[in-house]
Image (tube, rainbow, N blue to C red):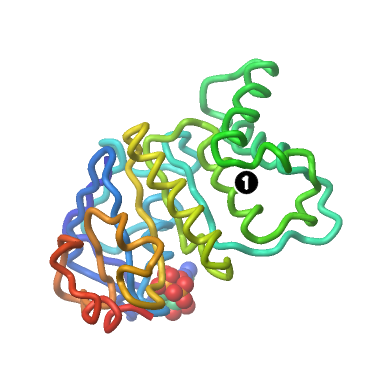
Amino acid sequence: MIRLRDAALAYGDRTLWRGLDLDVAAGEFVVVLGPNGSGKTSLIRVLLGLQRLTAGTVAVHGRPPRRGSDLIGYVPQHRTVVPHTPLRARDLVRLGIDGHRWGPRRSRPEARRRVAAVLRDVGAAEFADVPLELLSGGELQRVRVAQALATDPRILLCDEPLLSLDAEHQRIVAELADRRRREHGTAVVFVTHVTGARDADPVLPLADRVLDLGRLGGVRAGGVRAGEVRAGEIQAGAA
Ligand SMILES: Nc1ncnc2c1ncn2[C@@H]1O[C@H](COP(=O)(O)OP(=O)(O)OP(=O)(O)O)[C@@H](O)[C@H]1O
């Protein structure tokens, strides 16, 4: 699904990471860790086709990444909605379908059914018609997950979607991503901060592998088996 070989990213003369080899297969859940500024968001931007590598290669579904692919669902960091945004949860999810202009065209009733189905799947049906600005942070993130899943993507990229959510909603949102890969074989790349003990973390126990950009140190590549990474080591590498 995702393949990076000897990949490097630099802005000017500042190298964020290099020598990065990464494969993410269908149904795999890969967690990306690293301190602030280690290039986690930049990695997601590379996979979204928004940022070019400085060196090496990247393939998503066998091709160079391209913007707006409906093979990819993207869940951003939580941010509040601009006041008076005239959108309901249902409209935001619909944008997830209509925003992919190159995808297969869906009829209006089909799109409406799809929106209702994904909202139901993430447990957001009951606030489907509530204006976005009235939703809590956790509710809003559930809707953003629904938006990311609206096109039935093969890859789900999550960029610290749990920030500023309470523990219960962190668990709910992380488990939505996990359920997606189990039930649909969607590959998941999940950027997160580790804040406590490994077992108490909402994301690490779900990981097949952990990629710690803080430990690449600009030279060493690769992900390690989640089971082989000790909590202390992870926290040392994480922000
Ligand atoms: N387009 C750009 N041009 C120049 N520098 C950039 C650009 N985008 C990001 N950077 C810098 O690269 C570094 C890494 O940014 P990035 O957002 O990828 O890190 P991150 O690991 O996601 O950080 P955080 O945990 O704070 O979100 C930062 O210092 C940032 O200022």
Using residue 180 as the reference point, say whether residue 29 is left or right of it: left
Against 22, is 15 above or below?
A: below
Residue displayed at 43% across by 50% down: 175
Image location of residue 56, percent across then percent down = 21, 57
Q: How many marks?
A: 1
Tell me the quarter of the picture where residue 206 sits.
bottom left
Q: Quadrant of the N terminus?
A: top left
Residue displayed at 68% across by 42% down: 92
Using residue 81 as the reference point, say whether residue 186 is left or right of it: left
Against 224, is 101 above or below?
A: above
Q: Quadrant of the C terminus?
A: bottom left
Image location of residue 213, percent across then percent down = 28, 71
Against 204, is 107 above or below?
A: above
Image location of residue 165, percent across then percent down = 57, 66
Against 106, is 7 above or below?
A: below
Q: Secondary structure at mark 1?
A: helix
Q: Quadrant of ligand 1?
A: bottom left
Tell me the quarter of the picture where residue 195 sits.
bottom left
Residue displayed at 52% across by 21% down: 104
Residue under label 1: 143
Between 169 and 78, the one lying in front of the other is: 169
Hey, what amino acid is under mark 1?
A: Val
Using residue 211 as the reference point, say whether residue 140 is left or right of it: right
Most extreme residue toward the right is 84
Residue displayed at 47% across by 34% down: 70
Q: Is mark 1 within 8 Å of ligand 1?
A: no
Q: Dot 1 surroundings within 10 Å: few (below 14), some, or many (20 or more)?
A: many
Using residue 115 as the reference point, say whether residue 20 is left or right of it: left
Image location of residue 156, percent across then percent down = 41, 45
